[in-house]
Image (tube, grey):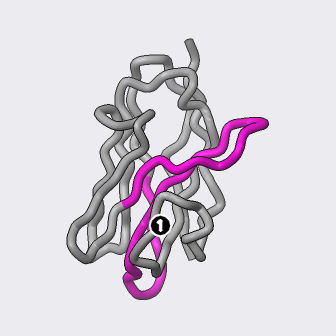
Amino acid sequence: QLQASGGGLVQAGGSLRLSCAASGRNLRTYGWFRQAPGKQREFVAFIRWRGSIIDYSDSVKGRFTISGDNAKNTVYLQMNSLRPEDTAVYYCAISVRELGLTFATSYVYWGQGTLVTVSS
C-alpha cells in the first residue's frame, strides 16, 4: 500500500514537498508520475535503491529533487520553482524492474495520487 501526501495550492515560483510512504517491505524503485487534466500520465522522477540511481524528466530537471529514507520506506519529491504547467495529480509508484523505469507500465503498485495546483 502506498500513501502519497503533500499536495496543495501554491503560487508560481513556490515550493511543495510530496511524500510517499510504503507499507511492508522495501521494494526496488520508487517513481513519481503526474497526470494533468486531459493528458496522459507522464514520468517525473524515479529513485532506485540499489545503485542509488536517480533520473528526472527534462521538464523538471533542476527544479525537482527526489530523495528517500530507506529505513522508513518513504520517498520525497521536493518541488521548487513551480510553474502553472506543473499542475497535475501526482502519483507515486513502485517497480520491481531494473529497466524501463521512465514508463508507467513498469510500475506495479500505485498510490492514490495527490493534487498539486500552481496558480499564475
Q: Quadrant of the C terminus?
A: top right
Few, some or many C-alpha atoms within 10 Å of disc 1 (few <14, some 14-19, many ≥20)?
Answer: few
Q: Which residues are magenta?
A: 19-46
Q: Residue 59 versus residue 31: which sits nearer the camera?
A: 59
Outermost residue to the front: 99
Q: Is residue 3 magenta?
A: no
Q: Quadrant of residue 46?
A: bottom left
Q: Residue 74 versus residue 51: which sits nearer the camera?
A: 51
Residue 24 image offset from top left, x and y in percent: 46, 86
Left or right, 76 with reference to 114: left
Residue 17 image offset from top left, x and y in percent: 39, 43
> In what element is the residue under mark 1?
loop
Q: Quadrant of residue 84?
A: top right
Residue at point 36% right, 74% down?
73
Q: Quadrant of residue 13?
A: top left
Three-letter amino acid code at disc 1? Gly
Q: Is residue 42 magenta?
A: yes
Residue 5 image offset from top left, x and y in percent: 52, 53
Q: Quadrant of the N terminus?
A: bottom right
Outermost residue to the top: 120
Answer above or below: position of 104 versus 84: below
**Which residue is disc 1 drawn over?**
100
Q: Residue 76 versus residue 51: which sits nearer the camera?
A: 51
Q: Residue 54 versus residue 93: which sits nearer the camera?
A: 54
Answer above or below: position of 16 versus 14: below
Outermost residue to the left: 51
